[in-house]
Amino acid sequence: MKTSTPNTSPSVDAAALRAREQQFCWPSQTHYYQEPVLPVTASMRRVQDAEGREYLDFFGGILTISVGHCHPKVNAALKAQIDRLGHVSTLYPNVPAVELAERLARITPGKLQKSYFLASGTEADETAVNVAQVFTGAMEIIALRHGYSGRSAMAQALCGHSSYRAVPTQIAGVKHALSPYCYRCPLGLEYPSCGVKCAEDVKELILTTTTGKVAALLAEPIQGVGGFVVPPPEYFRIAVDIVRSHGGVFICDEVQTGFGRTGKHWFGIQHWGVEPEIMTMAKGVANGMPLAVCIATPEIADAFKKNQISTFGGNPLSCAAANATLGVIEEEQLARNAEVQGERLLDGLRKLQKRFPKVIGDVRGKGLMIGLELVADEQHGDRTPNPAFLGKVFEETKRRGLLVGKGGMFANVFRIAPPLSVTGDEVDEALSKIGESFAAAAG
């Protein structure tokens, strides 16, 4: 599909709008850049701001724009649906929601079959924990350090980042296992001679900090907010087997990794060959429309007998957008495109690492979910996080019309995740802008 130019920006006084936001919105609402970009129009991989500047979007609203901004097929589905039915809540079934549930049962791995729709990834993770506790009869949950699950009390308890925890943990029974973070191994070991001890340690965690029976392990296949941390190939098989041997199930958080993002497969966990009993998803499922899903095996879904209601869950508009989005991913083979363009991007970033070996400590990722970790002096073994240099490069990429993300415990990891429809020419354009930005920041 050809890249189209964004529509002409409506007249917006950017300075006045920023001032109004400061007056009426919470200051904790984080923005990127010293002077935040103010997007007003977008098309596919291009965004235009209020001042008329154009950007190539390589972050897609935090891995949410799957097929491209304002994709014509997704927009057409939304326009048609809003004239038919806009809202009913989960008190009533609706055609787009049932069609989406059936489609998800077809494309998800293993025995996953029954979906519950919600409005955010936070709600999906909370629902997954709740149903796992009901099904197993156990209360304790294993989460991972460096993981991120959302903003509710339960989600903050699951979260492995102090910077996202506003108050001390209020929910009991959450135990945090070691992150499979090879570049910064918490055990000071190296893969593969380490024997994947981070996974083996889950058994020690259960035996020493729980009742010995757990409800679930909740983990992202690739830790998103954590800095696109990619576990070793053996990690999930070992960790999940241990959890199951102690009565628990595996909740796979595919909020960021789902729907072709990691290339080749529909879902990230398929790279590790493990089939979860419960899966959560949001973000990319509806190409920017608010929608989240908790899907489970029939025996787990059927075990939840209490009443459930979600006012915005299964919203016909969001579900219509999701059906169109998944249709585009399938028809245009975008998971395959993510694999191909991801390799092109990884290759270019590894060449960039050779140009800047001091500050680029690690290049990692799968498909179009790639992290670039910046450090003080990799050449001399100093892996001290270098968020200051990242900040400089970040501003330079913006100056050159490229939007990327950042993350990691120390805000020293570039997160690069363009829409799955990205072209080879756009990957090359982004690589050129990133290289220029590093050179400018270093100079």
Image (cartoon, grey):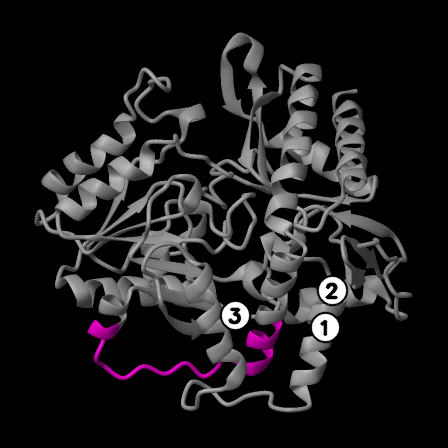
Dividing the picture into quarters, in which one does residue 123 lie? bottom left
Q: What's the amino acid at mark 3?
A: Leu
Q: Residue at x 40, y 53 (%)?
A: 253
Picture coordinates of residue 400 (x, y %)?
A: 83, 39
Query: Is residue 112 on the magenta stretch?
Result: no
Provide the residue designation for mark 3.
291
Q: What's the amino acid at mark 2?
A: His
| Image disc number at residue 75 | 1
Left/right placement of residue 397 relative to residue 144 reads right
Q: Nearer the viewer, mark 3 or mark 2?
A: 2
| Image disc number at residue 313 | none
Residue at the extreme left of the image, as rendered: 211
Provide the residue designation for mark 2.
71
Q: CA distance from mark 1 to mark 2?
A: 6 Å
N-terminal label among 3 and 1: 1
Q: Residue at x 84, y 54 (%)?
A: 2
Whether the residues at callouts 1 and 2 have beta carbons within 8 Å, the answer is yes
Residue nearest the observer in this picture, 254 or 358: 254
Q: CA distance from mark 3 to mark 2?
A: 17 Å
The answer to whether residue 221 shows anywhere in this view is no
Secondary structure under badge 3? loop
N-terminal label among 3 and 2: 2
Q: Residue at x 78, y 67 (%)?
A: 17
Q: Is residue 272 above or below residue 171?
A: above
Quadrant of the image containing the N terminus: bottom right
- The part of the chain drawn in magenta is 302-321
Secondary structure under badge 2? loop
Q: Residue at x 73, y 53 (%)?
A: 36
Q: Is the magenta region chiefly helix, strand or loop? A: loop
Dividing the picture into quarters, in which one does residue 363 lie? top right
Residue at the extreme top of the image, as rendered: 380
